[in-house]
């Protein structure tokens, strides 16, 4: 999706300002001061004259006849041409730079994924993975986020994390992250159906890597345990509730 930058907005604003200046000036001089060979009775006619003047077409049907009108037209031509040429050059350069930047970013992202070794993969950005990421970042460990949501991925990148947008349930999409060479893979997603498919994909791609799935309910924990005995299942809420209950029992 193309998002206008400040530079493009500035150029477009300059073009609009020059056009409005030309239209209003033409209308005032042509309607009240009789500065042209014909009476300018509408803004449409004023806009028409402004466009053909700035574009240097000059059909000759409307001609300035007074000194003030001629000075105005000269200012309009000089300023209009300058703004339009600068804007056309600037906007095309900005679009080209963005295209090159996107291609370079895509190539860099591909190389980054290909060079991943002995890394920690955080699939999903729920509360547990976010907390883990904070700790890993402090300890300067190599890790990446993988999420199917672009908004979430952009937010993670804004926080300084290496985050990639990918379909976690697609074996083809997940293969590029070298999961088989990962030190550990931690899956933390709220979508129950997607986490099951993701675990199946991860297990097939990373048979020798440590895989941990975060369960948020007892039923989810049971479903995940039924998938495979080779993956670790952690239910944070169950652990916390057990600790609290144990302490309460010890106090009494």
Image (cartoon, rainbow, N blue to C red):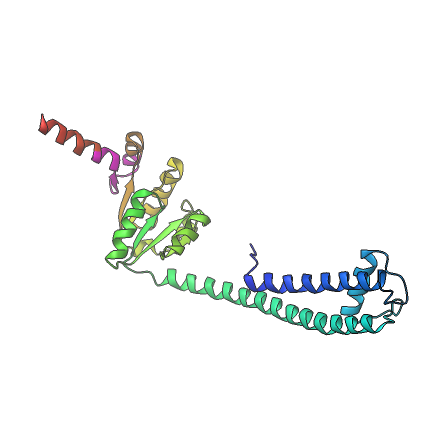
Left or right: residue 207 versus residue 29 is: left
Residue 40 shown left or right of residue 123 in the figure: right
Number of marks in picture: 0
Is-magenta flag for residue 167? no
Q: In which quarter of the image is residue 46?
A: bottom right
* x, y percent for residue 131: 28, 47
Work out which quarter of the rendered image holds the N terminus and state it: bottom right
Point out the residue furthest to the top here: 252
Quarter of the view holding residue 68: bottom right
Give the farthest residue toward the front: 33
Q: Give the range drawn in magenta.
A: 224-240
Residue 86 image offset from top left, x and y in percent: 64, 71
In which quadrant of the rendered image does the C terminus lie? top left
**239 in the magenta segment:** yes
Query: Could you tell me which residue is drawn at 36 percent across and 57 percent down?
Result: 160
Q: Where is residue 56 in the image (x, y as percent from the top left)?
A: 79, 72
Front-lying residue, 14 or 70: 70
Seen from the viewer's position, the closer of residues 231 and 18 is 18
Task: Left or right? Give the position of 198 relative to 210.
Answer: right
Image height of 76 relative to 140, above or below: below
Above or below, comparing residue 82 to residue 166 in the picture: below
Whether residue 114 is visible here, answered yes or no, is yes
* Residue 235 visible in this rendered orientation of the protein: no
Residue at image position (78%, 65%) is: 50
């Amino acid at each position: 999706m193309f998002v206008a930058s400040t530079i493009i907005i500035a150029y477009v604003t300059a073009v609009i300002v020059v056009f409005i200046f030309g239209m209003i000036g033409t209308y005032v001089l042509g309607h009240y001061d009789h500065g042209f060979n014909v009476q300018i009775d509408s803004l449409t006619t004023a806009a028409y004259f402004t466009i053909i003047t700035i574009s240097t077409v000059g059909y000759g049907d409307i001609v300035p006849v007074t000194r003030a009108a001629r000075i105005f037209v000269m200012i309009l031509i000089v300023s209009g041409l300058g703004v339009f040429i600068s804007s056309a050059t600037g906007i095309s350069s900005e679009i080209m730079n963005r295209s090159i930047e996107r291609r370079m970013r895509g190539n860099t992202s591909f190389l980054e994924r290909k060079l991943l070794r002995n890394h920690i993969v955080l699939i999903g950005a729920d509360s547990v993975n976010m907390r883990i990421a904070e700790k890993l970042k402090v300890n300067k460990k190599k890790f990446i986020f993988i999420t199917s949501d672009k908004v979430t991925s952009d937010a993670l990148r804004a926080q300084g994390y290496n985050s990639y947008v990918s379909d976690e349930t697609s074996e083809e999409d997940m293969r590029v992250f070298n999961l088989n060479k990962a030190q550990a893979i931690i899956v933390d997603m709220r979508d129950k159906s997607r986490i099951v498919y993701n675990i199946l994909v991860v297990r097939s791609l990373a048979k020798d890597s440590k895989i941990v799935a975060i369960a948020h309910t007892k039923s989810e924990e049971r479903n995940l345990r039924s998938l495979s005995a080779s993956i670790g299942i952690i239910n944070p809420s169950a652990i916390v509730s057990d600790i609290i209950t144990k302490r309460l029992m010890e106090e009494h």
